């Protein structure tokens, strides 16, 4: 196991290459709230970790939050040896997240 923090692993992998899943691309292109690759990079390199998913079927993954073009976005990603896999990207809503978008609402 690496001694680097999750955020350090994410940024190291992203500095090599960023690969988007088809699901991430589809989510980024939603008409009313499209998210640009530049916004994703801002979240990766300047955002914060919100959740960690060590048992994810796609490999150890993380939820990041960061500011895109004046708004908060969430990025779910999995660092690999040679790249950062972007699993999904979305603009969080207050229906599912507490203000600040770092804590999920309980039902």
Image: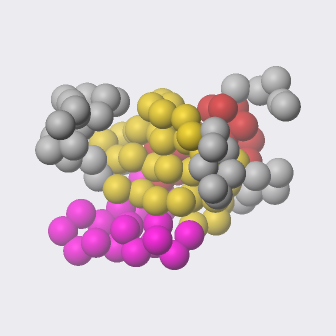
Front-most of 26 and 103? 103
**Residue 29's x, y, as percent?**
34, 73
Which residue sits at x=34%, y=30%?
Answer: 102
Q: How is the image coloured?
A: secondary structure
**Residue 97's x, y, as percent?**
24, 37
Residue numbers of the magenta segment: 21-39
Q: Residue furthest left?
A: 95
Instruction: Classify the position of the N terminus by image quarter.
Output: top right
Which residue sits at x=40%, y=39%?
Answer: 66
**Residue 86's x, y, as percent?**
56, 58
Instruction: Classify the position of the C terminus by image quarter.
Output: top left
Would you say residue 36 sits in the magenta stretch? yes
Position of residue 69 in the picture relative to residue 94 (left or right): right
The reply to whether residue 95 is visible in this rendering is: yes
Quarter of the image for residue 31 reads bottom left
Quarter of the image for residue 89 reads bottom left
Which residue sits at x=74%, y=41%?
Answer: 12
Location of residue 18 with respect to 41 vertically, above or below: below
Position of residue 71 in the picture relative to residue 45 (left or right): left
Position of residue 10 in the picture relative to residue 50 (left or right): right
Location of residue 94 with respect to 88 vertically, above or below: above
Front-most of 97 and 4? 97
The reply to whether residue 42 is visible in this rendering is: no
- Callout count: 0
Quarter of the image for residue 72 reads top left
**Residue 56's x, y, as percent?**
60, 49
């Amino acid at each position: 196991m690496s001694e680097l923090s999750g955020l350090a692993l994410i940024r190291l992998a992203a500095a090599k290459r960023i690969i988007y899943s088809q699901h991430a691309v589809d989510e980024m292109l939603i008409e009313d709230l499209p998210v640009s690759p530049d916004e994703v990079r801002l979240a990766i390199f300047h955002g914060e970790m919100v959740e960690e998913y060590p048992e994810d079927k796609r490999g150890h993954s993380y939820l990041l939050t960061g500011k895109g073009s004046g708004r908060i976005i969430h990025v779910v990603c999995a660092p690999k040896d040679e790249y950062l896999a972007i699993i999904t990207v979305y603009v969080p809503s207050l229906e599912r997240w507490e203000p600040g978008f770092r804590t999920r609402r309980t039902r």
